[in-house]
Image (cartoon, rainbow, N blue to C red):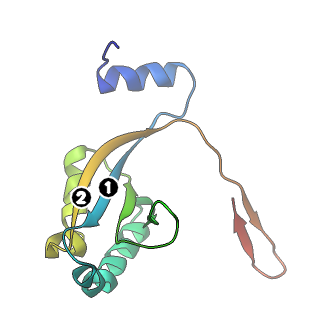
Amino acid sequence: MAQSSWEAHHEHVKEKGLLAKKLYVVLTKPAGDMEAVMENLQEHLKYQLELEANGSMFAAGPFADDKEQEWEGEGMVILRAESLAEARSMAENDPMHKSGARTFRLRPWMLNEGSITINVTYSNGKRNIT
């Protein structure tokens, strides 16, 4: 299979009329036992809310195990950043990673397809996102 530079691929996708939104995915997993993860969970969530509030976070959440029965401490964060270096800095400053409770892998990602539906009921303020 022929390889293409990331930028060339990005331009190709844009020319095809797809979204071509550049984002960064942080795949995070425990470095050891879950005790360290749980000890850092509150500070991690506080940091996540800061990223959300300043517009840096696109989405985040935990992974279940392959049988959808347990949470083993893994998660994913999708960041808006101007560069890989900026995204790496955000990931490194997560209290989970700073403390050594989790390690992470950072991957550039391009959002091309998909959809979101948001339904807001005015009378009671309920919302449904699908």
Please identify the quarter of the rendering in which residue 118 is found: bottom right
Relative to 127, is 19 above or below?
above
Which residue does the numbered mark 2 point to in the structure image?
Answer: 104
The picture places residue 126, in percent across and down from the top left corner, at: 75, 77
Residue 101 visible somewhere in the drawing: yes
| Count of numbered tags | 2
- Name the secondary structure under disc 2: strand
Relative vertical location of residue 18 with respect to residue 27 in this rendering, above or below = above
Q: Residue 69 appears at what percent x and percent y?
A: 51, 71
Name the residue rendered at 35%, 51% in the picture: 25
Q: Secondary structure under badge 1?
A: strand
What residue appears at the point 37 percent right and 55 percent down from the top-left corner?
A: 79
Type of the residue with mark 1:
Val
Please state if 96 lies on the left or on the right of 125 as rendered.
left
Name the residue: 41% across, 22% down: 11
* Residue type of the residue flagged with mark 2: Phe
Which residue carries the number 1 mark?
Answer: 26
Q: Residue at x 66, y 52 (%)?
A: 116
User: Crowdedness of circle 1 by 10 Å Cα count: few (<14), some, many (20+)?
Assistant: many
Residue 30 rendering spot, x and y as whole percentages: 25, 69
Question: Alpha carbon of mark 2 to alpha carbon of mark 1: how far?
Answer: 6 Å
Residue 114 or residue 7, whichever sits in front: 114
- Label 2 close to label 1 by CB (< 8 Å): yes
Residue 37 got which mark?
A: none
Residue 56 seen in the current view: no
